């Protein structure tokens, strides 16, 4: 197997560096991530939706990943240097090419009588580094929407989508 390689993603909008408040929600076929958009990156927001609420409002990003296998927590920014592939420049958002984790998942699934290797060809291993958490997720893609609302209301929106 080839060595893992980190490929940076031009991720917009960026999350707040101090208190991004990332939250993960997992449904049947999708995983949702929400985070507070960095106030210094609000100029990258070209459109957003407003959700009615009765609290303090901020810009939130809602990312819907086409996949449900993830790891969250793992490490904070003080120990990122202990991460595999750190020497390649881990920061913000990236894809782990030649992912050992995807290979491990494929090996687990190969015992299924209807295993189809071609279904694994379009899966990516995403790695997002926040201040106090890391999100790693295997997914075929993602979509980012921006909302101007409260933290309570963005959570309600995600739960409504999961339960549709």
Image (cartoon, helix red, strand yellow):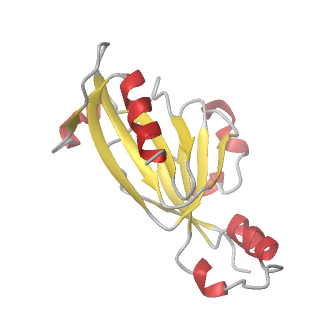
Examine the rendered structure and indicate whether residue 5 appears above or below residue 78: below
Please give the name of the residue rendered at 73% of the width and 75% of the height, measured from the top-left corner.
106
Residue situated furthest front in the rendering: 164
The answer to whether residue 163 of the structure is visible from this angle is: yes
Examine the rendered structure and indicate whether residue 13 appears above or below residue 108: above
Q: Position of residue 92 (x, y in %)?
A: 47, 45
Q: Is residue 156 left or right of residue 71?
A: left
The answer to whether residue 12 of the structure is visible from this angle is: no
Q: Is residue 132 left or right of residue 162?
A: right
Q: Nearer the viewer, residue 138 or 83?
A: 138
Residue 55 location, quadrant? top left
Residue situated furthest top in the rendering: 55
Please give the name of the residue rendered at 70% of the width and 40% of the height, measured from the top-left corner.
74
Residue situated furthest left in the rendering: 46
Q: Position of residue 107 (x, y in %)?
A: 80, 75
Q: Is residue 1 left or right of residue 70?
A: right
Please give the name of the residue rendered at 43% of the width and 52% of the height, measured from the top-left corner.
64
Q: Nearer the viewer, residue 129 or 136?
A: 136
Q: Position of residue 103 (x, y in %)?
A: 73, 73
Q: Position of residue 123 (x, y in %)?
A: 56, 71
């Amino acid at each position: 197997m080839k060595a893992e390689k980190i490929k940076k993603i031009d991720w917009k909008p960026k999350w707040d560096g101090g208190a991004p408040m990332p939250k993960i929600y997992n449904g049947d076929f999708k995983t949702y991530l929400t985070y507070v958009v960095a106030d210094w990156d609000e100029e990258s927001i070209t459109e957003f939706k407003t959700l009615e609420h009765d609290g303090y409002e901020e810009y939130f990003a809602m990312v819907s990943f086409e996949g449900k296998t993830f790891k969250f927590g793992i490490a904070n920014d003080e120990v990122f240097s202990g991460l595999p592939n750190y020497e390649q420049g881990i920061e913000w958002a990236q894809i782990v090419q030649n992912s050992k984790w995807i290979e491990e998942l494929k090996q687990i699934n190969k015992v299924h009588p209807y295993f189809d290797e071609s279904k694994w060809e379009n899966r990516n291993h995403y790695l997002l580094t926040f201040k106090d958490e890391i999100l790693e997720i295997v997914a075929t893609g993602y979509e980012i929407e921006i909302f101007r609302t409260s933290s309570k209301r963005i959570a309600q929106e995600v739960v409504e989508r999961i339960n549709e």
